[in-house]
Amino acid sequence: MSEFAPPEVPLDELVDDVADRTGEDPESVRTWLDPFTDDGSVTPEAIEATVTDVSQILATAETRVDLATRTVEDASDAVGDVPDLEIVRVRQNAFEERLADLRSDVEGLGGELSAATDDLDSSVDIYEAAVDLHEVTTDAQQIVRVAHDLETEVEAFEAWLGSANRRRDALVDDVEAAEESAESLREIVESLRNADDPDPERWFDATVQARVLDIVVADLRTETAGLREWAEREDKSFPDDIETRIDSVRDEAAASAEALADRPDWDDRFDERLEDLDAALSAVEPPVAWGYVDEVIQEAREGIAADGLSED
C-alpha cells in the first residue's frame, strides 16, 4: 500500500461523496467498499487487510502457474522420446503458448496489485482501489482455474505420448464424435427442409456446423496419418477402418452442406457473416488449433445475435 494512509472515514460519508462525484449508485458503491470497512467506517487497517488477502490469492495463482510450468517442462522432456511428428508438435506448441499467456497474465496482475493502492488521496481513489482489488482477485482466481486445467490436460498429453492404446482409443473416440455430429446435422437439415417456415438463424447455425465438420474431417485425416505412421514405427496395431469411417463423415457432411446451400430467403447479413467466417477459417490447416476455430465460430454466432436477425 502507499505510504499515505487515508484517515478513518465513516462509510456513509464516503459512500455519499463517491456517489456525488461519480454518479454511481450508492448501494453499489457501498458493496464495493465493504472489504475496506470495519465497524461502519473505512479504515487504513481494513484496507491493508484487504491488500494482504488479495496478495495471498495472487500468490496462489503464481504457485499454480509454477506447477503448470513444471508439468509442461516434464511433457517437453517426454516429447524428446517420441517420433518427431506434427501431431505431437502442434499439441506441445499449444500448451507452451497457453502457459506463456498465463505467465504474462499473472505478472500483469502483480503490477495491478501494486498500483491499486498507490494513490488514496480522495474518496474516489479509495473506491477505485476497492474495485481494482476485486478485479485482481477475480482474475487471479480465474488464472488458478485455467492453470489447473492446463496441468490436467498436459498430464493427459504425457500419458497419450507414452501409450499407443491411449492414442488409438482417443482417435476412435474422436471419429465416433464426428459421426454423431454428422448424423445430428443430417437430422437438423432434414427438419429445416421439411419446415413450412424454417428459421433463418437456425439455418445459419447448421451451415456453420457443416463448415466445422469439413475442418474436423481434415484434422482427423492428419491425425490418422500421423498415428498410423507412429504405430508402424513401433510395430503396434492400428484400426483398419478409420479412414473409411472418416470418408463417410465427409460424404454425409457434404450432403448436408449441399442441402443447406438451397436455403430460404434470408437477410444479406447472413451471407456477410458466412463470408467472414470462411475467410477466417481458410487459414486453418491441420493439425487444427481448435481454440482459434472456437473463437471464430463464437464471433460469427455472436455477430448474428448482435445484428438482431431473429427479430426481423
Image (spheres, rainbow, N blue to C red):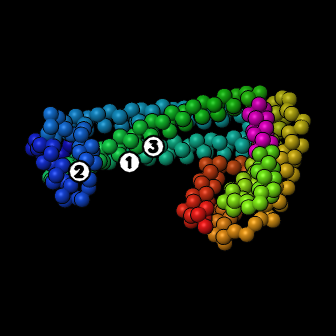
Q: Which mark is residue 26?
A: 2
SS label for mark 1? helix
Magenta segment boundaries in residue numbering: 168-182
Q: Quadrant of residue 2?
A: top left
Splitting the image into 4 quarters, where does residue 141 fall?
top left
> CB under 8 Å between callouts 2 and 3?
no
Is residue 176 shown in magenta? Answer: yes
- Residue at (75, 48) in percent of width and height: 216
- Distance from disc 3 to disc 1, alpha carbons, whole Å, reads 9 Å
Q: Residues within 10 Å of mark 1 (few under 14, many from 20)?
A: few
The residues tagged by marks 1 and 2 sit, at their Cα atoms, a distance apart of: 31 Å
Q: Which badge, 1 or 2, is on the more N-terminal residue?
A: 2
- Residue 156 lies, with reference to residue 125, above or below; the image says above
Q: Which residue lies most toward the left here?
A: 7
Q: Residue at x 21, y 40 (%)?
A: 36
Circle 2 packing at 10 Å, graded few (<14), some (14-19), many (20+), is some
Q: Report the residue marked by disc 1.
A: 108
Residue in front for this viewpoint, 232 or 138: 138
In this figure, which residue is indicated by the disc labeled 3? 103
Closer to viewer: mark 1 or mark 2: 2
Asked if 239 appears above or below 212 in the picture, the reply is above
CA separation, marks 2 and 3?
Answer: 37 Å
Of the image marks 3 and 1, the number of the one nearer the N terminus: 3
Residue 271 percent location from the top left of the image? 68, 69
Per the image, label 2 sits on a secondary structure element best described as helix
